[in-house]
């Protein structure tokens, strides 16, 4: 039995009742619409005011928000498809999974860049303007996508090299392991994720402790930057959960065999949805400038 058919057998075995399926889909849809509405408001605010798109900090933030929107939109769509259409053409599923992987893997790298920007602003304020320019920020975002591309597109190239052409015309239950079934991809993923996590964690911890030291003797801005880094740490911890999802699913199936789908649903909310709700909090609510302009937009719409 191949990976795809084995996966389908598991899904059929633990299929939800109609009532439970409707409840789960409504919950996921409400979460997705709410998060995307907030993110769309942040993007609209960013685009309407020059103060934001001339500031490297907000450019990095809005890049994070755009990735969150992509991740939430595709993730929720795939969740709904799994209960309705059920199976997708491999080529279509492949495109959706690749888009999700881009958004997911961009997030930790973007968080590390935002932490470095906070560190420069607090610990090297006189050089911040020279170091953190608009041009360098855009180059940095391009570098994030380039680094992610090496990891994401390699999955596609390995699959093209190892699977027959008919495979891409077949229909499967849309998951990463069904469209990229090669064992080589799993080994490559484990190695690259480990490297990414070491780099990102090293960057965030270094910047946090430097800012923490500065906050003991410096201004309120340093303390606020320290709290922002802590939020980045929390968000990164949630993002890391996606790296351990396969092992977590196997453990849940063994621990709760009668409630497997419910366990997977909770896992999905924690891993895929919750991390995307943190970004609006970091700047949308905590940042005084963003909050001020958001209030203006809300007042105009309600008037």
Image (spheres, rainbow, N blue to C red):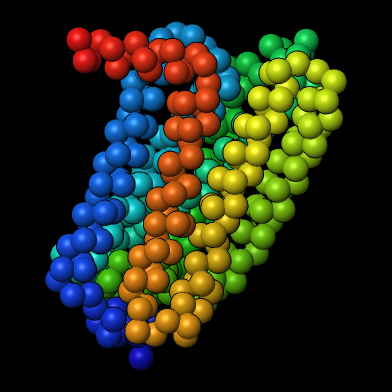
Instruction: Give the percent coordinates (x, y) of residue 247.
Output: 53, 74
Instruction: Give the percent coordinates (x, y) of residue 263.
Output: 39, 71
Near-viewer residue (246 or 89): 246
Near-viewer residue (67 or 3): 67
- Residue ID at (20%, 67%): 21
Q: Is residue 210 above or below residue 30?
A: above
In this orientation, does residue 162 appear?
no
Badge count: 0
Q: Is residue 67 above or below residue 284?
A: below
Near-viewer residue (181 or 41): 41
Q: On the rendered structure, is 105 left or right of 114?
A: left
- Residue ID at (28%, 12%): 299
Instruction: Give the percent coordinates (x, y) of residue 35.
Output: 34, 39
Picture quarter containing residue 136?
top right
- Residue ID at (25%, 47%): 30
Q: Is residue 218 above or below residue 76?
A: above
- Image quarter of the C terminus: top left
Picture quarter containing residue 109?
top right
- Image quarter of the N terminus: bottom left
Picture quarter containing residue 147?
top right
């Amino acid at each position: 039995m191949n990976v795809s058919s084995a996966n389908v057998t598991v899904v059929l075995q633990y299929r939800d009742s109609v009532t439970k399926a409707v409840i789960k889909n409504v919950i996921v849809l409400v979460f997705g619409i709410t998060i995307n509405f907030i993110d769309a408001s942040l993007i609209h605010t960013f685009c309407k005011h020059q103060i934001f798109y001339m500031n490297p900090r907000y450019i990095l933030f809005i890049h994070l928000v755009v990735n969150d929107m992509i991740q939430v939109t595709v993730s929720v769509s795939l969740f709904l498809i799994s209960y309705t259409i059920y199976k997708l053409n491999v080529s279509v599923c492949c495109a959706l999974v690749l888009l999700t992987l881009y958004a997911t893997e961009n997030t930790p790298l973007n968080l590390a860049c935002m932490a470095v920007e906070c560190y420069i602003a607090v610990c090297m304020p006189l050089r911040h303007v020279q170091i953190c320019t608009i041009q360098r920020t855009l180059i940095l975002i391009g570098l994030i996508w380039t680094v992610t591309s090496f990891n994401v597109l390699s999955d596609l190239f390995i699959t093209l090299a190892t699977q027959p052409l008919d495979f891409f015309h077949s229909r499967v239950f849309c998951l990463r392991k069904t469209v990229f079934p090669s064992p080589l991809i799993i080994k490559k993923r484990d190695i690259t994720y480990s490297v990414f996590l070491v780099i990102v964690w090293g960057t965030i911890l270094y910047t946090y402790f430097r800012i923490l030291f500065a906050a003991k003797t410096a201004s309120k801005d340093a303390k606020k930057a320290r709290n922002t880094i802590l939020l980045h740490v929390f968000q990164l911890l949630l993002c890391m959960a996606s790296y351990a999802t396969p092992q977590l699913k196997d453990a849940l199936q063994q621990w709760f065999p009668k409630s497997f789908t419910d366990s997977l649903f909770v896992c999905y909310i924690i891993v895929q949805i919750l991390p995307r709700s943190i970004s609006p909090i970091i700047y949308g609510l905590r940042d005084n400038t963003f909050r001020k302009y958001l209030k203006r937009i809300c007042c105009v719409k309600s008037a």
